Image (tube, grey):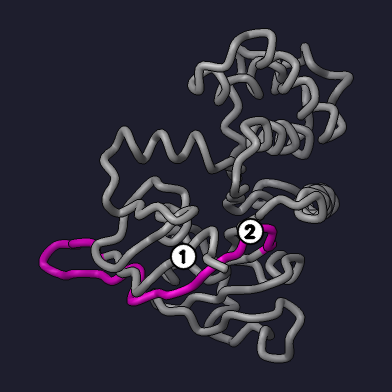
Amino acid sequence: MSALIEFRDVCKHYKMGGETIAAADHISMGIQKGEFVAIVGQSGSGKSTCMNIIGCLDVPSSGTYLLDGRDVGQMDKNELAEIRNELLGFIFQQYNLLPKLTLLENVEVPMMYAGIPMAERHERARVALELVGLGGKLRHRPSQLSGGQQQRVSVARALVGEPAVILADEPTGALDSHTSREVLNLLQQLHRAGNTVVLITHDNSIAVQAQRIIRLEDGHVVYDGDAHGPEAVVTPKAAGMGGTA
């Protein structure tokens, strides 16, 4: 069975002054439909580079990235935007909600870009907000919510387009430990419902909530396996706390 997400010898190079940095260095991996996978690593590991490539926000310098069998590296900007809207739902650390819009309107935004009629947008947004436990707050604005509730709105917004992949970038990074557990429980519920979830994190305690861990160091995959396997224990180097990479 072909993977939903497939990296074949993917490299991503950046020029910094006169130096070339390999943010992703010959990475090969596959993620199947219905998996819950955490990509984990400290700052500089390449995890955010991988996220940008998976999310069609960037393309490899060399190698091949296939999303649902399509070669993303051969796409122009318009095609990348189209495949993002069609196949990907994003959950960000900082929620990225529009403060002047109601929760319902915030969740509708991706469907507006997709040209979905208003009545259908309203209904799908309402159902998504009910799914994350915010059905009674449709007319509220983001400033009236807690951080955890705002992140639930961003989960609803990611779900509403019925994406092939839910891509969560440090989704608990701005939350306290109790609220973080609530958001992780929600991601696990989405996975149990059949969704493919890819979680990007620097935190090993967050990563082990997934089924499978792909651990990166210096642009290389150093572990790819069961999140609860004996070799999944974080190495001292990978234990460093960091931001994006």
Mark linked to residue 43: none
Nearer to me, 140 or 192: 192
**What whole-number distance in Å separates the C-alpha atoms at marks 1 and 2?**
11 Å
Residue 37, located in which quarter of the rendered image? bottom right
Residue 42: percent from left, percent from top: 52, 70
Amino acid type, callout 2: Lys
Magenta region: which residues? 13-36
Q: Residue at x 63, y 58 (%)?
A: 33
Label 2: which residue? 33
Q: Residue at x 73, y 91 (%)?
A: 230
Label 1: which residue? 6
Nearest to N terminus: mark 1 or mark 2: 1
Q: Are marks 1 and 2 in contact (CB under 8 Å)?
A: no
Q: Is residue 78 above or below residue 8?
A: above
Q: Residue at x 52, y 69 (%)?
A: 30
Left or right position of 214 against 174: left
Within 10 angstroms of label 1, few (less than 14), some, or many (20 or more) residues?
Answer: many
Nearer to me, 243 or 149: 149
Residue 163: percent from left, percent from top: 60, 41
Q: Quadrant of the N terminus?
A: bottom right
Residue 210, located in which quarter of the rendered image? bottom right
Left or right position of 158 against 153: left
Amino acid type, callout 1: Glu
Asked if one can make out residue 143 in the rendered structure from this viewpoint, the answer is no
Q: Residue at x 71, y 64 (%)?
A: 206
Badge 2 marks a residue whose secondary structure is loop
Badge 1 marks a residue whose secondary structure is strand
Asked if one can make out residue 159 in the rendered structure from this viewpoint, the answer is yes
Q: Quadrant of the C terminus?
A: bottom left
Q: Is residue 187 above or below residue 207?
A: above
